[in-house]
Image (cartoon, rainbow, N blue to C red):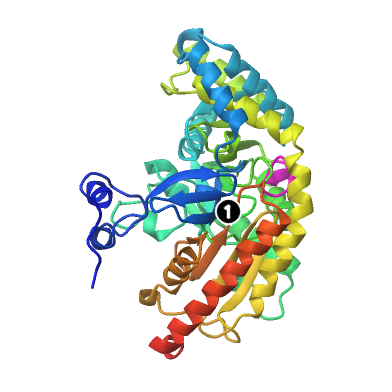
Amino acid sequence: MNTPLSNIETRDVETLIHPYTNLDALRTSGPFIIERGEGIYVFDSQGRKYIEGLAGLWCCSLGYGDAELVQAAKEQLEQLSYAHLFGGKSFEPAIELAEKLKAVAPHPASKILFCSSGSEANDQQIKLLWYYNNARGLPGKKKIISRKRGYHGVTLASASLTGLDVLHKDFDLPLERFIHVSCPDPYRGRRDGESESDFATRLAQELEETIQRENPDTVAGFIAEPVMAAGGVIVPPETYFDKITAVLDKYDVRFIADEVVCGFGRLGEWFGSNALEFTPDSISMAKGLSSAYLPIGAVTIDDDMYAAMLEQSKKLGAFGHGYTYSAHPVAAALACKVLEIYERRDILKHVRETAPVFAKRLKKLEEHPLVGNARSKGLIGALELVADKETKRSFAPEHMVHARATAFAQERGLIVRALPRPGDILGFCPPLIISESQIDEMFEIAEHALNDTQNWVRSENLHAR
């Protein structure tokens, strides 16, 4: 028998639309109300404490309630609560943040174009590619290649880049000009006896064949997360990006790195591009840029792109793009403080030192009867649950085993995420400030939750279905 919803839960279901939620089921179950956060922990409306094992949505890198960040926002609100960049206007926090981002960018960046989210950042990348090729006299060079299971946002254009069916079905997406190639998933994609290097070679060949089939004169860009996040925490095979980059260079296809999750220390370096040792033409960033304390995103602009933007602006009279909240002064000031903290507290070194503990504890769970694969890079990882470890057979989608596993984890005090299908995958992405003892605590809870899930699977005889 379902427990009646509390007053606040009723107010929620009667007023809010929740993203990535079964809205019909929510009317019965009610929402999970979080009241406050402290460090790596959040507390619900009943005062219960949880490890926030996904840093919110891969984003709260410095944890909750950091006094320095609260103070930075307060001081900027008191000095200049709003300003914009339209018509040549400017303000110090935007300038300072752009300078800081140019200094740490993984490629030679000339300028920074701000926005308010990762979706907007990738949407800007698409517009800029089209703008750029029009400026170069290549109006047919407009198609963009991304990868199946890649996640790049939810606007009409950025959702078209995303390679997950749930973002496409009944939204009439993807739009034209968007093409998807294979996911670089060694666990699911590698053939029997195929080395990681050979797998990477095959993926690069597929990319080249796709460009040739579409006609290189029509292909403008390729976008990839260094490590896929929402698509299953996919760590690409060895040599993958070297081989992909060689193909892109051959056909004058610009390489966009979606650093929205991997940027700002998640993999132990400033950006995932640094950690995986490749050089993109541009990057998209958000999330860790402000540790999610306020919405802000950005893209880097290299010299070639900037030259095209200058030419177009001269021809058209203005660069006809921008948002009301681009580089909002409070968000920009807070992001400047976040970058200062990353350096002063040596967060990147802390990630490099704790990542082996994270990887060891996660990999140990691969011994569990439910876990087919455990994978990680830096402080991001995933467990893929299977019905049969030997054959890698997944559970039937309707059983939603990963959702049940996350529910068991939450009951025990750990918030992790059931990632979008295919497969039953649990994502881990704790705040970067997590300690070794807290990593142990997190995975101890996860193991108990897996045992709870295994008992439920057995009771329902789901292995056989």
Residue 120 position within the rendered picture, expressed as x and y whole percent measured from the top left? 46, 35
Classified by dominant secondary structure, the portion drawn in magenta counts as loop
- Looking at the rendered structure, the secondary structure element under dot 1 is helix
| Res. 204 in view | yes
Residue 276 magenta: yes
The residues colored magenta run 266-279
In the picture as drawn, the residue positioned furthest to the front comes out as 47
Residue 358, located in which quarter of the rendered image? Answer: bottom right
Foreground pick, 449 / 24:
449
Residue 268 position within the rendered picture, expressed as x and y whole percent measured from the top left? 73, 47
- Give the total number of marks visible in the rendering: 1
Foreground pick, 182 / 142:
182
Q: Which residue is mark 1?
A: 212
Residue 246 magenta: no
Residue 383 position within the rendered picture, expressed as x and y whole percent measured from the top left? 58, 69
Inspect the image, locate mark 1, and give the three-letter code of the amino acid beneath it: Gln
**Residue at position x 63%, y 54% in the image:** 227
Quadrant for the C terminus, please. Answer: bottom left
Residue 372 position within the rendered picture, expressed as x and y whole percent measured from the top left? 60, 77
Q: Is residue 174 left or right of residue 171?
A: right
**Residue at position x 55%, y 61% in the image:** 427
Q: Is residue 35 above or below residue 461?
A: above
**Residue at position x 63%, y 23% in the image:** 97
Quadrant for the N terminus, please. Answer: bottom left
Q: Is residue 309 above or below residue 413?
A: above
| Res. 113 in view | no
